Image: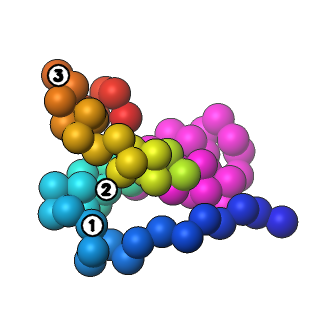
């Protein structure tokens, strides 16, 4: 059984976070799938990573390269 945590609807998240998610999620899932060899596991791992990024979003934005940090 996979673990799904409750998340806010995307429309309730800050616009910059939504844009970051839209821009990078696909590439992150692709990368994770190469290592996990399973699309569902890759999507879950990336979604969990984005949940953590959201919790730390102000710190992420303060990084020189938020994409590289993520």
Quarter the C terminus occupies: top left
Q: For residue 21, which numbered disc appears in the image?
A: 2
Looking at the picture, does residue 51 appear above or below residue 35?
below
Horizontal and vertical percent position of residue 20? 24, 52
User: How many numbered markers are drawn?
Assistant: 3
Horizontal and vertical percent position of residue 43? 57, 57
Horizontal and vertical percent position of residue 44? 61, 57
Sooner in the amino-acid sequence: mark 3 or mark 2: 2
Residue 30 in sight here: no
Q: Which residue is mark 3?
A: 64
Sooner in the amino-acid sequence: mark 1 or mark 3: 1
Q: Could you say which is closer to the camera, residue 62 or residue 65?
A: 62
Q: Is residue 17 left or right of residue 4?
A: left
Cα gap from disc 3 to disc 2, whole angstroms:
18 Å
Please report the bounds of the magenta region as a residue range: 26-47
* Image-quadrant location for residue 32: top right
């Amino acid at each position: 059984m996979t673990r799904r945590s409750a998340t806010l609807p995307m429309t309730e998240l800050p616009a910059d976070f939504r844009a970051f998610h839209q821009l990078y999620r696909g590439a992150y899932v692709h990368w994770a799938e190469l290592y996990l060899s399973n699309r569902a596991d890759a999507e879950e791992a990336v979604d969990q990573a984005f949940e953590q990024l959201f919790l730390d979003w102000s710190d992420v934005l303060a990084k020189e390269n938020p994409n590289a940090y993520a």
